[in-house]
Amino acid sequence: MLNKKLLFIAVIIVMGMGCRSVTNIVTTDRLRNFPAEINAGDIVHVATGEKITFSQLADSFDGARIVYVGEVHSNKESHELELQVLKEFYKRNGDNIAVGLEMFKRPHQDILDKWTDGEISEKELLFSTDWDDEWGYDYNHYKDIMDFIRDNKIPVVALNIKRDFQKKISRNGIESLSEEERKALPEIDTTDVYHRKYLERIMKGHGDTDISEAFERFYLIQCVWEDVMADSISKYLSSPEGKEKKMLVFIGGGHVIYHFGVPKRVYRSNHLPYLTITTYQLRDLKPEGDHPLFASDIPLQPADYVNVVELDKSKEPKVMLGVVIRKAYEEKEEEEKEEQEKQDKKVEEQKQKVAIESVREDSPAGKAGLKAGDIILSMDDESVDKVFDVIYHVRQKKAGDTCRIEILRGEEKMLVEVTFFEAKGHGEK
């Protein structure tokens, strides 16, 4: 009997030692399995540590109903892979695909439908979805993707909620929402331990030391984003138009890494097979620090595949007009009241026009002779009716380009030619 007891104790001790050994292996070998040397352009299959070709990556698409590509929003190379994946996905599946995009908000779904059907221009798309305020990243990174979607009439699903809705939740919590607003949200899950650890790391990495109250607000809105986007994906794939389709999801890498953001939440609702591709920007690592892909306190694989890109350090030269602009009628309000009858016709003509409020002397506008008070009527023969018209037109320009701007100065119409050059400082437009 004594020998049996001793044997039983020995087994427990060995098992305990074994558990500790396994734990050590988990925290170290995950990174050891990853290639010691990686370069921009490499694609790594994380489970095996094997570097693979894009063609080999593409073969894995066939077994998945959903493919998530985690992007770095400001990195051009990251978006180039997305375009490559989109083209391959379309080649393999034809019309049987849809694309889910974090960049667009659910209230704008009808606008995206019009884009897919070729009913609106790029300019109308950006203006109607309030791209600058709702997303803000360089549209040129997304242009080829959106053009391919429109050219091939691929359905697009807007995934997220609008920024003002997010801010409202962040400031006062979900309980502050109206009954109608709460109905627009799915159930929000804030219980994932590793998800919380990951987001705590991010917030501390931004220099925050006392994160208790601020973190809870930050964590709540992150969970809202991810559950809303997961809900958008799940609802589309179970809808009559989406139930037979495969889906590509282009989304920030932080919502894909370790699977616990959007992929886990979608899988929990529909159990559809999926795979994840995340983007890793090459950087110098601190010897004592955790690898960005392999946090020591998160024993999960970061993704199914890792796409390696250069750290985006260079900024493409940008040009600006060098003016502050506003709607023409805003400053005319008092004058309209004083001379209503006399000004009615003039105001109506100017009402939809854009006025220059100030001009930087060292800017293209200043050197071309534009002045405060000038009203912009057209640019390169395209009518200017709103502030966004000017913003959009300037974005199409690069250093050395010219622009013919028709202005109204007092009662006189004038044509001014502006030559753009690279911006050295900061300007409004």
Image: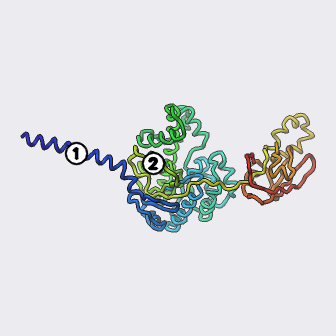
Does residue 265 appear in the picture of this structure? Answer: no
Q: Amino acid at mark 2?
A: Pro
Q: Which residue is mark 1?
A: 15
Q: Nearer the viewer, mark 2 or mark 1?
A: 2
Q: Give the label on residue 329, or none.
A: none
Please state the horizontal and vertical placement of residue 304, each as a whole percent of the image: 43, 56
Please state the horizontal and vertical placement of residue 418, each as a whole percent of the image: 83, 55
Say left or right for 269 vs 422. left
Q: Nearer the viewer, residue 95 or 45?
A: 45
Say left or right for 6 vs 332. left
Q: Quadrant of residue 140?
A: bottom right
Say left or right for 64 vs 140. left
Measure the alpha-carbon separation of dots 2 and 1: 33 Å
What residue is shown at x 82% (from left), y 51% (from top)?
365
Say left or right for 413 vs 268. right
Q: Nearer the viewer, residue 142 or 371?
A: 371
Q: Which residue is mark 2?
A: 287
Up/down of 197 relative to 382, above or below: above
Q: Quadrant of the N terminus?
A: top left
Disc with the residue nearer the chain's start (2 vs 1): 1
Residue farthest along the front direction in this orientation = 287
Display colour scheme: rainbow
Does residue 81 appear in the picture of this structure? Answer: yes
What residue is shown at x 53% (from left), y 65% (from top)?
90
Q: Nearer the viewer, residue 202 or 262?
A: 202
